[in-house]
Image: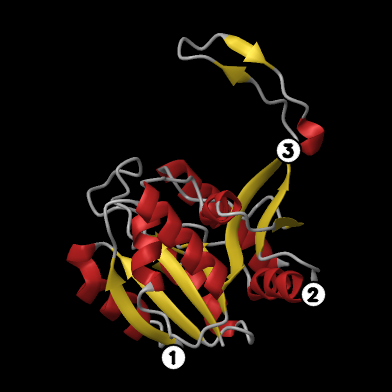
Amino acid sequence: MISAIVVASGSGSRFGGGEGKQLATLAGIPLVGHSMLALEKCEEVDEIVLVCHPDRVEEFSADVVVGLGLTKVSRVVPGRDTRQGSVAAGLERVREDATIIVVHDGARPLVTPTIFSQAIAALLCGGPAEGVVVGHPAVDTLKSVDVDGTVTGTPDRASLWVAQTPQVFLARVLRRAHEAAAASGFTGTDDASLVERAGGVVRMVEGPRHNIKVTVPEDLMFASALLATREGE
């Protein structure tokens, strides 16, 4: 049993416009709808739990789940104050018999069913790993800086990757990692960081660099152009 949690609960304050980004229109449908459709078409995924802003559960249910005719969505649940808390809210509502859990940011609309399938396969066939993160090797020079912006170092990018979503985990490992983080008050930047902290083995698998996260309005225009190019091909 493979369950997916799509996190779309942020306020979108950096996006502007008052309505946030998750329901902003991209290629004729809500932004988050692109991720949802990719999961709907992914044969390995059995269930989708959509986590959205607490005040917009009915809106997401109507505009995304009903509007796009999604059949795998079992629940639309209210998120919490942080992304980590929102994933935890989703974990509480996925099926108890789920053995693998996929976590994806709803603001990454260029994900495809193939990316989900490859990440799941990497977890199932990749040796001792308990989690898999889609990403790509860092290509830009990276700098460490202090609070004043002064450069304090230039790390070797050969060992650095940019982490994206989806991230795929053994369900029991992800649940345990979230419980440990909550008990200690630890906040991580992604779910993999919680699993790593709990001693889990996480592997990176390479995905396309264009699997971007829409954060500001300019990102939406970029995503629109990439979608148009992909459809043209």
Residue 44 - label: none
For the residues marked 3 and 2, what is the alpha-carbon distance in whole angstroms?
Answer: 23 Å
Pointer 2: what residue?
125
x and y percentages locating residue 186 in the rendered image: 41, 45
First-in-chain label (3 vs 2): 2
169 shown above or below 157: below
Q: Residues within 10 Å of mark 3 (few under 14, many from 20)?
A: few
Q: Residue flagged by tag 2: what amino acid is it?
A: Cys
Residue 138: image quadrant is top right
First-in-chain label (2 vs 1): 1
Q: What element carries label 2?
A: helix
Pointer 1: what residue?
71
Residue 31: image quadrant is bottom left
For the residues marked 3 and 1, what is the alpha-carbon distance in whole angstroms?
Answer: 38 Å
Q: Residues within 10 Å of mark 2 (few under 14, many from 20)?
A: few
Which sits in the foreground, 174 or 59?
A: 174
Report the side of 136 relative to 47 (left or right): right
x and y percentages locating residue 115 in the rendered image: 68, 68
Q: In which quarter of the image is the N terminus?
A: bottom right
Report if residue 67 is visible in the image.
no
x and y percentages locating residue 159 in the rendered image: 78, 37
For the residues marked 2 and 1, what is the alpha-carbon distance in whole angstroms?
Answer: 28 Å
Pointer 3: what residue?
160
Could you tell me how many numbered marks the image carries? 3
x and y percentages locating residue 8 in the rendered image: 37, 62
Q: Is mark 1 on a helix, strand or loop?
A: loop
Report if residue 100 is visible in the image.
yes
Q: What element carries label 3?
A: loop
Report the side of 38 relative to 139 (left or right): left
User: Do residues under tags 3 and 2 come within 8 Å of each other at their CB atoms?
Assistant: no
Q: Residue flagged by tag 3: what amino acid is it?
A: Leu
